[in-house]
Amino acid sequence: MTSSVRERHARLLAESRTAEPRARLAQASTRAEFLLRLSRTVSAIQNPQRALETLVSVLLEEMVDVAQVVVRNGPWQLVSGAVQDGPIHSSSARIVEGTPADLDNALRRGLRDDVVLPKAGAARRRALAGFLPDPDLVDEVDALGCEQLATLPLNARGRSFGVLVIGRSPGFGFGDAQNFLDDLAARIAVGLDATLVVAESRYVASVLRRSLAPTDLPQVPGLTLATYYRVAHQSQELGGDFLDVHGPDDDLILLCGDVAGKGVEAAVHAKRIRNAVRTAALVDRTPSSILGLTNRVLVSEAEEFSEGMATGVCARLRPEGRTLRVDLANAGHPAALLVRADGTVEEVVADGVALALLDNTTYDDVELTLHPRDTLLVHTDGVTEARGVDDLFGDHRLRDCLRGLGGLPPSALIESIAVAVSEHLGERAHDDIAIFAAQFSPDPS
């Protein structure tokens, strides 16, 4: 250890009872500055494992010769520890996989304790192994000759979620620094708790995102599919617009919808609707029947004063020789568009009440016929209601984007719309946006 590191340790942990008032004041100022800097450092790191490793590095650099941090987050236990001038040992494992008995007891009790280590032999190694899960760290602390360990609980929001284990070189203890160590543990606990909360929120969001994101488009002979999805709150990466395609290649169900609200709650509700539609399709694959049964489910589950309303378009696609038959029903959603191969754009007129408003609502099917290179395009109101400087994007701009693009791949149609909407929006806030296009492209042979 360099003399400068030893001096930093001394400034924080030197005995202060016999020091002059000026020296005690200087030490108090140094401790306060250190605690503030440490707290800000830990709070700024949003990855829990990196936060632990950074915390261990700072403690070894500024204060102690042995440092280990253990935190429990859900079913996981994260550990990071090291000795002065040694490598950091980090691990992540499920709690059920086992924790050394003494460390587990310290985690459960949530109380500060001082552990005097045996001088040498098997008893010393057993004592070290009771607090240090990593065998290599046990070897390094044993070789260092550490005589005492201090276990400091990490408590926040009324619970004990971790423990800090620290030690110093032979001949050095913690003296009258107990109040400072308590403050240290409290500051670390607040910072790490904030990091864990953010990490847990991101984990939950990632799980929801994977389960709620539009499903991968299937490879269907005779069809070319394309989608575009943009959420209102980019930080959440979740929204209330939803797309889904499912079923056998010769009897495909297409769903595009929009849930009232934004963010995680809307995305969860969208997932419920997708599941209800898939279930209803097992009973009757007619779009009007699917929407009717889904509506009954949503009405029966609706909570009072909740924003459970949703709109949607459901279509059934079935190849019939050189044409594609499309049966379509609409539940209060913006009208679907049919882009013919010659460039003409037709509105699919199909009216129906939004989902989750009225019980026993019935819907009507509209039958369409797609010829080679005709494209069915469905979108949410985030497209037409995108607000520019003076007005909304509107249906007229949408149709202008599509004119002359007949026969082009559906991805080209969607990209044209997405670019135009983005230019119209600029940097303004917007609603969730979803676009789905299906082009009939049978094998020429």
Image (cartoon, helix red, strand yellow):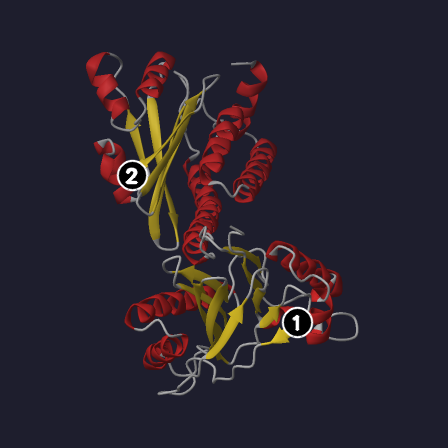
Vertical relation: 334 (above or below) 208: below
| Relative side of 35 to 102, left or right | right
Q: Is residue 207 visible?
A: yes
Name the residue: 56% across, 63% down.
434
Vertical relation: 426 (above or below) 125: below
Q: Amino acid at mark 1?
A: Val
Would you name the residue on which mark 1 appears? Answer: 345
Residue 348 x %, y %: 57, 77
Vertical relation: 333 (above or below) 411: below
Q: Residue furthest front?
A: 445
In terms of secondary structure, where does tag 1 sit? Answer: strand
Name the residue: 55% across, 20% down.
5
Q: Amino acid at mark 2?
A: Arg
Q: Decide which of 144, 293 is in the foreground and name it.
A: 293
| Relative side of 309 to 231, left or right | left
Choose mark 1 or mark 2, whichever is in front. Answer: 1
Residue 316 x %, y %: 43, 69
Which image quadrant for residue 161?
top left
* Mark seen at residue 94: 2
Name the residue: 37% across, 80% down.
292
